Amino acid sequence: MNEPDATLFPAGLLAAIKPSMGEPVKGQARIYIDDAVVQQAPVKIEKPKAGEIQWDVMHVRELFDLWRSFILLPEAYSMLGVYFDVSRFSWVMVVESEQIPAVGPGKMLPLLLPLHRREADGKVSLVEMQLIT
């Protein structure tokens, strides 16, 4: 079956059409990266300085691969981008998965809270992923 032309349908309608075509619908969510997590990164990550960002969010391509290797995500989750959220003065990662419900157009992406555990030997593992809608 052919893919419908996305330019002809609003995002919410296209999301409703795809399941009937037998394709899984992937929802998206935000993960805010806490300063304590940033400090654990293998390289120093600085927040953008005034004048280096545009209001609201800034896409940071250089950090994409670093976050993908550093933040433990289940295999079912794909990382779409890393941004700096100016209003929260925090890094935010946008992920996609069939396990996240799709949201309609104009709606805020849900918040995803990964819970990690550090063992005595220093190994870090993902314990659970909590979705807040």
Image (tube, helix red, strand yellow):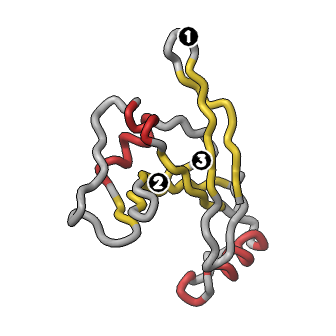
SS state under label 3: loop
Q: Amino acid at mark 2?
A: Val
**Residue 84 position within the rendered picture, expressed as x and y whole percent measured from the top left:** 38, 57
Is the residue 89 above or below the residue 14 in the image? above
Residue at 38% in and 33% down = 39
Instruction: Return the residue at label 1.
Output: 120
Instruction: Return the residue at label 3.
Output: 77
| Numbered badge on residue 99 | none
SS state under label 1: loop
Q: Amino acid at mark 1?
A: Ala
Label 3 or label 1, whichever comes before in sequence order: 3
Is the residue 27 above or below the residue 20 in the image? above
**Residue 13 position within the rendered picture, expressed as x and y whole percent measured from the top left:** 69, 82
Instruction: Return the residue at label 2.
Output: 92
Q: Real-space Cα distance between discs 3 and 2?
A: 15 Å
Q: Is residue 83 visible?
A: no
SS state under label 2: strand
As drawn, the residue found furthest toward the bottom would be 8
State which mark lies toward you, 3 or 2.
2
Q: Real-space Cα distance between discs 2 and 1?
A: 28 Å
Q: Real-space Cα distance between discs 3 and 1?
A: 27 Å
State which mark lies toward you, 3 or 1.
1
- Looking at the image, do the residues carrying marks 3 and 1 touch, with CB atoms under 8 Å apart? no
Depth check, front residue: 120 or 17: 120
Q: Quadrant of residue 114?
A: top right
Depth check, front residue: 51 or 95: 51
Q: Amino acid at mark 3?
A: Tyr
Q: In the figure, is residue 121 to the left or right of 103?
A: left
